[in-house]
Image (tube, rainbow, N blue to C red):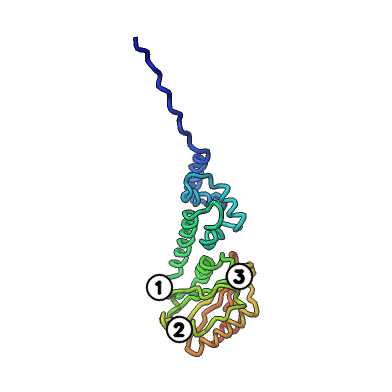
């Protein structure tokens, strides 16, 4: 009589411990689109799509210890993020994509074809902050405007310490002519967070203003930006309001 052999049951594969945590994070995010979530949890959500088979909470917290806040992580230079242990190419690219999307949203808010840029100073400030406000190096942004003060395009002209940079009026004039611009708006960041202009900032702006005046180009404003504040030379310094 043949005996019935019992088949050995295959062990069930259990989900990793962080799988349930990820589902809970997604549910919490969808409940209010992340408004109540701290930076480390929002960063976890980003990282988990780039790193699907690892608990990314320790990495999210480590990045925030290094960069202080979420905005700084997302705007960090890709080559810098890539060199941090555990980040890798996928997470670096995803952080850069999120930051680029933030820039694009701010840019589209600024680029209203029917309205001069300076009719909404807050949108200008938001755009400048998105572009350069979170950088740990000083960057100089030039926004080119048409005859009606509307946005044409912008360029980051210099990276470094503004006091040690000689910005050529000729370079701005050449680009303004190429873009058919009639005025420019200048912005640069102060990584220290103090938006007060230095004597070098003011002297450079006066020199540029005089140089551009020779070809009837004007400087609409020079904005100094930080992560949380800004300083407008047009609002505070009389020479910027004089023709």
User: Element at badge 2?
Assistant: helix
Report the residue at 52% width, 84% height from top: 169
Report the residue at 53% width, 87% height from top: 211
User: Which residue is more in the foreground, 109 or 177?
Assistant: 177
Height in image: 169 above or below 31? Answer: below
Would you say the residues marked 3 and 2 are in contact, meaning their CB atoms lie under 8 Å apart? Answer: no
Q: Residue furthest left?
A: 1
Q: Residue furthest top?
A: 1
User: Element at badge 3?
Assistant: loop
- Tag 3: Cα neighbours inside 10 Å, few (<14), some, or many (≥20)? many
- Give x and y (percent) for residue 162: 59, 76
User: Which residue is the site of mark 1?
Assistant: 113
User: Which residue is the site of mark 3?
Assistant: 190
Height in image: 79 above or below 160? Answer: above
Q: CA distance from mark 1 to mark 2?
A: 23 Å
Give the number of marks: 3
- Tag 2: Cα neighbours inside 10 Å, few (<14), some, or many (≥20)? few
Instruction: Say which of marks 1 and 2 sits in front.
Output: 2
User: Element at badge 1?
Assistant: loop
Q: CA distance from mark 3 to mark 2?
A: 27 Å
User: Which residue is the site of mark 2?
Assistant: 174
- Tag 1: Cα neighbours inside 10 Å, few (<14), some, or many (≥20)? few
């Amino acid at each position: 009589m043949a005996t019935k052999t019992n088949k050995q049951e295959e062990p069930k594969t259990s989900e990793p411990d962080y799988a349930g945590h990820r589902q809970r994070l997604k549910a919490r995010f969808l409940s209010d689109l992340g408004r109540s979530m701290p930076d480390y949890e929002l960063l976890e959500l980003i990282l988990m799509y780039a790193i699907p088979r690892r608990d990314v909470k320790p990495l999210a917290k480590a990045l925030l210890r290094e960069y202080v806040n979420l905005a700084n992580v997302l705007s960090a230079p890709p080559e810098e993020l890539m060199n941090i242990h555990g980040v890798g190419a996928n997470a670096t690219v995803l952080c850069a994509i999120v930051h680029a999307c933030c820039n694009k949203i701010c840019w589209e808010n600024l680029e209203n074809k029917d309205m001069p840029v300076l009719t909404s100073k807050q949108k200008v400030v938001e755009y400048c902050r998105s572009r350069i406000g979170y950088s740990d190096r000083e960057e100089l942004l030039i926004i080119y405007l048409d005859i009606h003060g509307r946005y044409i395009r912008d360029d980051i002209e210099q990276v470094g310490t503004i006091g040690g940079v000689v910005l050529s009026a000729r370079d701005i004039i050449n680009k303004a002519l190429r873009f058919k611009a009639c005025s420019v708006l200048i912005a640069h960041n102060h990584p220290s967070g103090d938006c007060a202009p230095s004597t070098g900032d003011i002297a450079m702006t006066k020199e540029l203003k005089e140089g551009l005046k020779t070809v009837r180009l004007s400087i609409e404003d020079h904005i100094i930006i930080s992560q949380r504040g800004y300083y407008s030379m047009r609002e505070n310094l009389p020479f910027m309001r004089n023709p």
